[in-house]
Amino acid sequence: MVIHRKHIYPEKDLALPRTLHDDRHRLEQVEVPVVTVSASFRQDIAKNLHEHTRKKGEIVFSRAHYSMAVAILDEARRQNLSAWLVDPINFLSADQWQRLVRIELIGQLTARIPILKKIKDIFDTFIRKQVPLKGAIDKPLEYVTTRVEKPIVSVHYESGNFLARHGKKVLQIVTDPHVRPHYLFEAGRPNISFAVFDEATRKSFFAKAAGQNLELAPDKVVVTGPPVDPRIIETRKGKKADSYKKRGLRLVVTTSGLGTNYKEIEELLTGLLPAVKERKIELLLYASTHRDFRKMYLDKAAENGLSAGDENAKTQVRVIWDESIVTANQKLIEHAFGWADGFITKPSGDMAYDASAAGCFLLTLSPWGEWEENIFDIFTRLGIAKAADINNFVEQLDSLEKENWFSRAINNALNIDDIFLNGAKNIVDLQQNWKP
């Protein structure tokens, strides 16, 4: 039954008021409302919904928090449940937009300048408390969720904490095998529960809660596994562990939402590109939304006399890039996971989960933080990941091929435990059976 209520329009300083108003009604009515804090997709709103803003460009903080939210959305719809996804970053006022543009720039610089990264590592929790993300999203998030009565799946702790404080039923996704202090800020409230990566993360959650004198019911924190897009999981079908031996390796090199590992990737390509012709290696280079990565990829290919094109090109080197995180992610799903044998990526909570679920091995770049060190440890123990030797990468590839490691790692990925494949399904099931 659809409940007809008086229309209450958003405050005039918020962007895209028509879309925000429509999203409010959609979230109110669907069975699986999903909220994340990851990136804007204003260009997609303009293209598809014909509503525009004066502020141009996009803000992108994270592919992970976007792609995981989309995974849950897609899984819900596959279960014939109505679902909708909102990211309040799209609706920021002009002033708040400019504030987050500056924060995004700082994040991008930190991702590219080692000394800034070291400072960030030392003061990570303090910095996250000071970043004005929480204050920026409050107004649009409150407006868009005011009438939602169903449990809301939150894919970022900032949205989950805000919604819990405002009395909403919240299923908070703990996106990594790592419990940040932020997840505990509102954990004592009866209206929030948590979906976690594995049993070790669950135990860590309760241990950290006890350290803050929080007594939590055993069913408040549930192991679901990581949410991977069902479309990615489908790409594992028909894969064989030794296919690369007949045609040469297919490798995907990826950066992140903020553009991490620039120097590492540049050095890796400097060593790898001269060898791709002889070894029949095919490369797909993911630049996300970053123009500097796209330019670097194309320049490096040209320096080595290699033709390079977009994701549809019939060239040995291809590049995925788009201004929109929505389109960039879609291209990655369509062209990378089913095609690839392995991913060269930092051990992040999106790429590691997605690549292994697709039946690919991982050669990992430097982790961004403790949570990614945990991810690396887990997938190393599973026999799917190894650290990339940036300065001797071609030699490492030759050595791993002699050891038959690629076939063994792909086989391990193809036989990975179901908990790594069913996370999105388990989360939707948990949301549908949510108990206070």
Image (cartoon, rainbow, N blue to C red):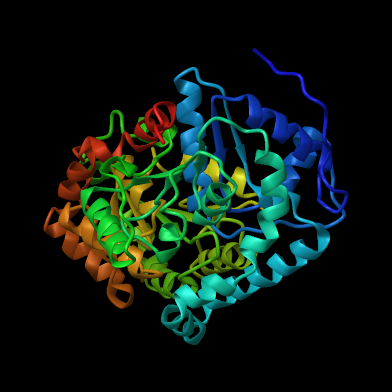
Between 16 and 285, the one lying in front of the other is: 16
The answer to whether residue 49 is above or below residue 154 is above
Q: Which residue is at 39% across, 54% downward?
A: 349
In the picture as drawn, the residue positioned furthest to the bottom comes out as 115
Query: Is residue 313 in view from this perspective?
Result: no
Q: Which residue is at 62% across, 53% downward?
A: 39
The answer to whether residue 333 is above or below residue 280 is above
Query: Is residue 96 in view from this perspective?
Result: yes
Between 249 and 184, the one lying in front of the other is: 184
Q: Horizontal and vertical percent for residue 330?
A: 55, 40
The answer to whether residue 107 is above or below residue 93 is below
Q: Which residue is at 41% across, 59% downward?
A: 184
Which of the 4 image quarters holds residue 86?
top right
Q: Horizontal and vertical percent for residue 426?
A: 34, 32
Q: Left or right: 266 with respect to 422?
A: right
Q: Left or right: 139 with respect to 411?
A: right
